[in-house]
Image (cartoon, grey):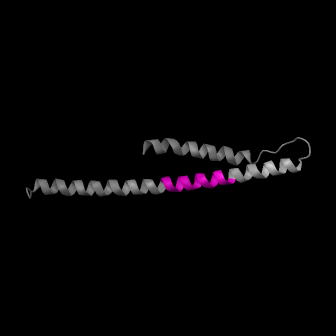
Amino acid sequence: MKPLIRIVPLFLSIGLLVGCAGEIVSTGSTPSATDDSADRSFHDTMDRLNEQMALDAANAAAQQQFNDAMAAAQQTENQHNDEFNQNGLH
């Protein structure tokens, strides 16, 4: 779980940088058709990156829920085994 906690801020930082990058406006000369195409391509790439990051975050959350459920099941089984062994029922 600790590696996941260290990775989440990285993803959030990248998402923030990507979101801010879309707000940067060039103050150069009048954009040409090539600039528009490159800009559109850049934004399409950023949109795909944002979508992938959202999917990765959702998958990480689902994986963490699964891990928590498995740990709870294991703890319950361990408690049952301890009770079984204490009662001398083996």
Question: Total number of numbered labels?
Answer: 0
Q: Quadrant of residue 81?
A: bottom left
Q: Which residue is at 46% across, 42% downward?
A: 3
Q: Quadrant of the C terminus?
A: bottom left
Residue 46 is left or right of residue 31, and the answer is left
* Magenta stretch holds residue 38: no
> What x and y, as percent, mark residue 53?
59, 51
Q: Quadrant of the N terminus?
A: top left
* Magenta highlight on residue 59: yes
Where is residue 45? Give x, y as percent: 70, 51
Q: Position of residue 61 (x, y in %)?
A: 48, 55
Which residue occupies 71% across, 46% down? 20
Q: Which residues are magenta?
A: 47-60
Q: What residue is at 38 percent from the left and 54 percent from the top? A: 68
Going by the image, does 58 lie left or right of 47? Answer: left
**Residue drawn where x is 64% and y is 51% of the image:** 49
Which residue occupies the extreme right position in the image?
Answer: 30
Left or right for 85, reference 4: left
Determine the main secondary structure of the stretch shown in magenta.
helix
Q: Nearer the viewer, residue 72 or 30?
A: 30
How far across and down, in percent of the image, does residue 46 sit? 69, 50
Q: Is residue 36 left or right of residue 12?
A: right
